[in-house]
Structures are given as structure tokens and as C-alpha cells.
Image (cartoon, rainbow, N blue to C red):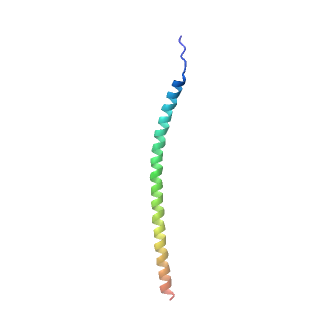
Amino acid sequence: MSTSKVTLNDVYAVVNRLEDKVDKRLCEVDMRVNRLEELKAQAALIVSILAVVVSVAISWAWNKIFE
């Protein structure tokens, strides 16, 4: 029966492997979140521009009607 000792290098190796797995997953999630944030920013821009255009159109129509 042999006894095997766990060295600090063994622990470092295991932790590094786990860290690599977690880092890979987090990088994938980060890329997906960045795409969603870009989409959200584009949607907010479109809504803002649309709101300005509608506001200007309503103001113009209001002035034309009640002049």
C-alpha cells in the first residue's frame, strides 16, 4: 500500500485548470453580454430619435392648427 502525498504544485495545477475552465466560460458570457448591450444601446438610440421626430411633428401640427 502506497501513500501519495499531495504537494502544493498539485494543488496549483488543479486550481489553474479550474481557473482556465471558468475563464473560458466567463469570456463567452462576456461576449454575449456585450452583444446584448450593443443591441440595447441601438434600440435606445432609435427610440430617442423616433421620439424627437414625433415630438417635432406634433408641435408643428399643433402650431399649424391653432395659428
Q: Residue at x 50, y 84 (%)?
A: 63
Asked if 44 appears above or below 25 in the picture, the reply is below
| Residue found farthest to the front | 9
Residue at 46% across, 53% down: 36
Viewer-nearest residue: 64 or 45: 45
20 and 29: which one is in front?
A: 20
Q: Residue 48 location in percent, x, y?
A: 48, 67
Camera-nearest residue between 12 and 58:
12
Residue 4 position, x and y percent, is 53, 16
Residue 49's spot in the image, x, y percent?
46, 69
Above/below status of 48 relative to 28:
below
User: Seen from this angle, which residue lies furthest top?
Assistant: 1
> Which residue extends farthest bottom?
67
Image location (x, y in percent) of residue 33: 48, 50
Tell me what residue is drawn at x 46 percent, y 61 percent. Answer: 43
How many badges with numbers are in the image? 0
Q: Residue at x 51, y 87 (%)?
A: 66
Above or below: residue 32 compared with residue 63: above
